[in-house]
């Protein structure tokens, strides 16, 4: 067995328990979580997420300096709640997201956690946010065999990225979006259709409404599937958003206000995004002869996306792994789990460590 994978499996089997406190503030969610790992079992002692959706709704997206201020305000409250819920355990390790993410938001969490680790006199581990969207899958993973090599797809508000995974910590980016991320596309389309923020869950709900009607559509909405037949593993979603804008503008006020039209548009947008994500991921999975496909990121919260990936994966002979609903969007459990796997990477250079808004994986 590969030495590194063997090391990670041994980590999970260790008998002494380890308690990790993690903070995540890469975007607009303030998250603090405390987990306990013992004998390959990860127990969540607390997982508090304070969402800023109400504040950013007005702007139709996240306003970074405002988000930073909210994080600074929320962090002490969220920490207090997380500690109380976990019954003030003896923490062994502290972790925080280093990047990628919105720089002011990352700094808010980083400064807060650094001070906390210093006060607690505990080691600090800095975590890659993309990696944590993948490794959160280990929370509920029962069968840890036949996973690697794996093709991981992270689809969030900031990223759409395909990563070849030879093991935990062994990553190679093989494709990513050239412009907007899939979640960003959902958010921008929702803004065009005046549906609110964040767009992903709203469009998901409207698409489901249309699907459950089970009648032929009243309006025919056809959108492109950008880059679907290109041989590379890259994505592009900004053209799809523009196509929605032109399609929407071409309709009369009356049609634009019709719920039937909106639900049909949402269904088609969702189909277009899922079609491209599946085609590219399955092609990459086949080309690199992987054993499993691992999904992560806010967009994976969509039941339809998971269902379609499961169908395509089963058909092609891949194990499809994804987090349960609450662990797709940002939370600090994912940060804590990633720190567990990288517990050896303790911060030494306290004075010079920094966040990195463009931190790469691999
Ligand atoms: O991972 P995440 O919480 O934050 C980032 O790291 O970006 O992802 C947020 C994104 C948003 O763009 C949101 O619209 C999208 O995930 N999202 C969804 C769903 N729930 C959240 N997209 C599609 N369907 C959903 N059910
Ligand atoms: Zn995220």
Image: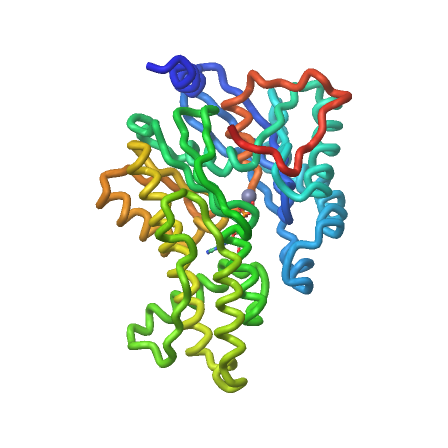
165 displayed left or right of 239: left
Q: Looking at the picture, how far across and down is residue 47, in whole percent?
A: 56, 39
Ligand 2 is found in the corner quadrant, namely top right
Above-or-below relation of 36 to 224:
above
Total residue callouts: 0
**Residue furthest toward the front?**
231
Q: Looking at the picture, how far across and down is residue 3, in whole percent?
A: 40, 13
Residue toward you, 145 or 150:
150
Residue at image coords 33%, 31%: 142
Snapshot quadrant of residue 4: top left
70 displayed left or right of 7: right
Above-or-below relation of 88 to 228:
above
Residue at image coords 44%, 15%: 15
Q: Looking at the picture, how far across and down is residue 80, in whole percent?
A: 68, 38
Q: Is residue 327 visible?
A: no
Of the 4 image quadrants, the one containing the N terminus is top left
Residue at image coords 46%, 30%: 172
Q: Looking at the picture, how far across and down is residue 150, in whole percent?
A: 36, 32
Above-or-below relation of 259 to 159:
below
Q: How is the image coloured?
A: rainbow
Residue toward you, 259 or 138:
259
Residue at image coords 42%, 61%: 270
Q: Is residue 131 visible?
A: yes
């Amino acid at each position: 067995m590969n030495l590194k994978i063997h090391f990670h499996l041994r980590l999970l089997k260790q008998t002494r328990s380890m308690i990790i406190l993690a903070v995540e503030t890469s975007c607009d969610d303030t998250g603090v979580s405390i987990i306990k790992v013992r004998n390959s079992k990860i127990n969540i002692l607390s997982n508090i997420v304070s969402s800023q959706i109400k504040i950013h709704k007005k702007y139709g997206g996240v306003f970074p300096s405002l988000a930073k201020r909210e994080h600074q305000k929320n962090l002490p409250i969220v920490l207090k709640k997380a500690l109380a819920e976990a019954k003030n355990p003896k923490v062994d390790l502290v972790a925080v997201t280093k990047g990628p993410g919105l720089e002011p938001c990352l700094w808010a969490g980083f400064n807060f956690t650094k001070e906390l680790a210093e006060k607690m006199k505990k080691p600090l581990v800095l975590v890659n946010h993309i990696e944590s969207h993948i490794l959160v899958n280990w929370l509920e993973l029962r069968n840890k065999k036949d996973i690697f090599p794996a093709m991981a797809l992270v689809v969030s508000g900031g990223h759409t990225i395909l990563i070849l995974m030879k093991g935990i910590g062994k990553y190679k980016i093989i494709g990513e979006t050239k412009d907007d991320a899939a979640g960003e596309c959902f958010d921008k389309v929702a803004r065009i259709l005046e549906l609110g923020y964040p767009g992903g869950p709203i469009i998901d709900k409207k698409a489901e409404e249309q699907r459950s009607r089970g009648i032929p559509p009243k309006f025919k909405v056809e959108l492109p599937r950008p880059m679907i037949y290109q041989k590379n593993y890259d994505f592009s979603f900004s053209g799809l958003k523009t196509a929605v804008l032109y399609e929407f503008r071409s309709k009369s006020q009356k049609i634009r206000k019709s719920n039937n039209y909106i639900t049909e548009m949402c269904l088609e947008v969702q189909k277009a995004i899922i079609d491209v994500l599946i085609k590219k991921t399955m092609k990459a999975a086949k080309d690199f002869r992987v054993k499993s496909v691992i999904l992560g990121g806010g967009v994976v919260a969509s039941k339809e996306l998971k269902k379609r990936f499961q169908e395509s994966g089963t058909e092609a002979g891949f194990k499809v792994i994804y987090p349960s609903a609450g662990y797709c969007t940002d939370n600090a459990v994912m940060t804590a789990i990633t720190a567990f796997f990288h517990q050896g990477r303790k911060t030494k250079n306290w004075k010079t460590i920094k966040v990195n808004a463009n931190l790469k994986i691999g």
